Amino acid sequence: MATPVLVHSAETRLRRPLELWLRLFRELRASREVIWEMLKRDLRSQYRQSFLGVFLSVLPALATTGWAVLFRNANLINAGDVKIPYPFYVLCGMMIWAAFLESIDAPIGGLLSEQGLISKANVPPEAVIAAKLGQVFVNFFVKSLVVAVAAVWYQIHIPGTVVLVPLAMLCVVSLGCAIGLLLAPINFLYRDISKAVPVVTTFWFFLTPIIFTSPNEGLASLLVRKLNPVTPLLVTVRDLTFRGYLSMRTEFELAAAFTFLLLIVGITFHRVAMPIVLDRTNS
Amino acid sequence: MSYAGNEGSETVHAAAPMAEAEALYLIEVRGARKKYCRDFRRSLYYGLQDVASALLLRDPHPEELRQHEFWAVDGVSFKLRRGESVGLLGHNGAGKSTLLKLITGQRSLTAGQVTTRGRVVALTELGLGFDGALTGRENAYLNAAILGLPRHKLTPIIEDIIDFAGIREFIDSAVQTYSSGMKARLGFSVATHLEPDILIVDEVLAVGDLAFRRKCIQHVMGYLRRGGSLVLVTHDPGLVQAVCSRCVMMDHGRVVFDGDAVEGVQLYLDFGRAIARPANLAADPSRPPPPSAGGQPAPQNTVPTGTHPPARRRGSELSDEKPVIVDAFELIPEAGPSLLTGQAARVRLRCRSKIGGPVGWGAIVRTRDLRTNIFAFGLGFDGESIDLHAGENVLECRIPHLPLQPGNYAICGGVSDLETIQAIAALGFEDAPDFFSVETGEASRNTNWQDVMQTLVQVPVEWIHSTDAGSHET
């Protein structure tokens, strides 16, 4: 049996980037069991300890859909022509948006809540994040059952492209996760980050075509379509779900490439900063 | 499986055969140094600085101490062979726990290198990752996975673990219905059944009742007999003597003794005695402890207390959460060089405070294994108080006849709030107590007899020579 030999020294990890990545993969591979056990634990306690379980996890999305419909009927929102039943449109967008928010929180909130495991039991922080991302996917799957029920209710034709939804969702989750990875180490030092995130994302919500269609002209178009990387990702998931064609294909490709780069930067930064930051916490 | 929270750490699954001599050592620590910052806010800012310099590939200047920084571990080299069991002793803030964290990779090194060979399991907190909504069995699997044992390896031993913890009838109930003792038993049971190459235990053997504690220690000894290696950090010298063959004593971040366990424990107790006196070696960290402090002249009570600044507890700084810090307890004979049974003694509590006002204070004198409380005294239960001022304080009281028999003792205590009678600051409860020794005065038949009877205290008795034996019965 091979004996695992560990050498700890004081050098910064960034000096050997290749090793940084190899080590990450090795640690994640070695942590498969922990990731799986943590994911099971989180899901069990999420669904076991609440009576309404599944229903509660979709309640926020349903609530948003409810007020969006009310506001639109009262002419407070100019939603544009969504071409399908408006409640269904909002519901889809909300599910994707919720997964995006959960992915931002996977590194930020996830690491804070599992601080003990990371600093006392040597569970790699990335394993904790992986388990939380697994939970994001499971939650998304559970919620898509609700979308499926809504689709039947509104008699919406679901095209075959729907099978590609997980791939596009991977981009959405990766983008959220990359943002979270960049913020999480700083949040360990200064909790201001986790307080600022909801403020920023609330603003961001209104720059993303969830309760309205993406505008085609003016400043709004620039902000929503050109500068917001979530827009093409979210629109693509929605297109795959009920349109069957991609309305923002080029933008999607650009956003996916951006996401990929940001993820690499995020992971590298996280690997370098996390050990330093963990040193400064009180546990 | 292990995550090393260290910059530049690397895992190598040894493919090439290791040199024989090298492979003998499961742990090799070379010149390890670690600095900490006393001020929390500043520490966060330094963290930000360090992240920035790591990103810029800049050297973090490991030799330089920034403001409020100190060396928690200062150039420690230490090796552990397979099958060896080492007890790590030292007073509060000596750097024991930090050294363990450097070995397990929970903290990153400022300088030096640490190599571990084999699976390391660190027991620093029991029941990590426990979730109240899950059953005991589910939590056992989770906890084992966190400590590095996959499910298929736990399944064959899960029944042993449940029996060891003694909670079979509750194992399929949710953990939130458990008492804290049951949780600790389950956590301990899982952890000790993992049979790692290196077991690292930090102050967790003291869980549960005495019977369970004995069982734990027996289990650890069994693990050692089967060839396991152990590093144990504790304030209980008795445990080191029972379990360890070797003892490493640390003071001010350095190793001051490394050798036989029995010798080390003796030194630790003597060391404690030395610290109980103002002219002690804590004022000079570079000096190794003397073999015995018995011959040192203790200062008279006329010596102004300001001449010897108290040994400050390292790593503790006054804050809003810690408005008062107890630095030391001293027992000082009123006359003569040493404390004697039946003679007058003074107890001094040295503390730092950032608040002023009336407080209570008190102390408990315990046997040095901390298992028996001998006597206690406190001011502040019935409205009396003493005034604390901001800055350094010395609180003092007098014991006219010290009842303690010759021997070594521990003293714990603290400063308390008058209204709630709760401790504002304490020493010796969550950390190590201070030690002192009472010596034999003039030998007599009575003192020898008391010694033979192994009593803890001597109480003055007035003999009544009455001939009227039956007077109470009438």
Image: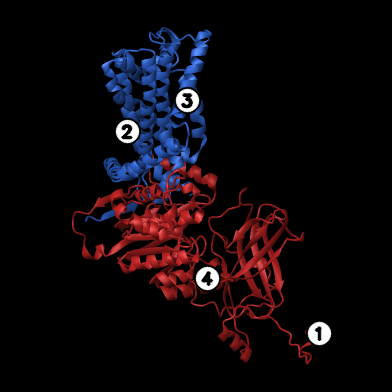
Chain colours: A blue, B red
Q: Residue at x 56, y 82 (%)?
A: B454
Q: Residue at x 47, y 38 (%)?
A: A49
Q: Name the residue under label 3.
A: A59
> Could you tell me the amino acid type at mark 2?
Ile
Q: Mark 2 lies on which chain?
A: A
Q: Mark 4 lies on which chain?
A: B
Quick check: B250 above or below A173?
below
Amino acid of disc 3: Leu
Give the crowd class for mark 1: few <14, some 14-19, many >=20 residues within 10 Å: few
Using the rendered image of the protein, determine whether residue B444 is visible from the camera's viewpoint: no
Answer with left or right where residue A70 lies relative to residue B446. Answer: left
Instruction: Name the mark on residue A264.
Output: 2
The residue wearing badge 1 is B474
Determine which residue is flagged by label 4.
Answer: B369
Q: Which tag is nearer the camera, tag 4 or tag 1?
A: 1
The verdict on a common chain for dots 4 and 1 is yes
Q: Residues within 10 Å of mark 4 (few under 14, many from 20)?
A: some
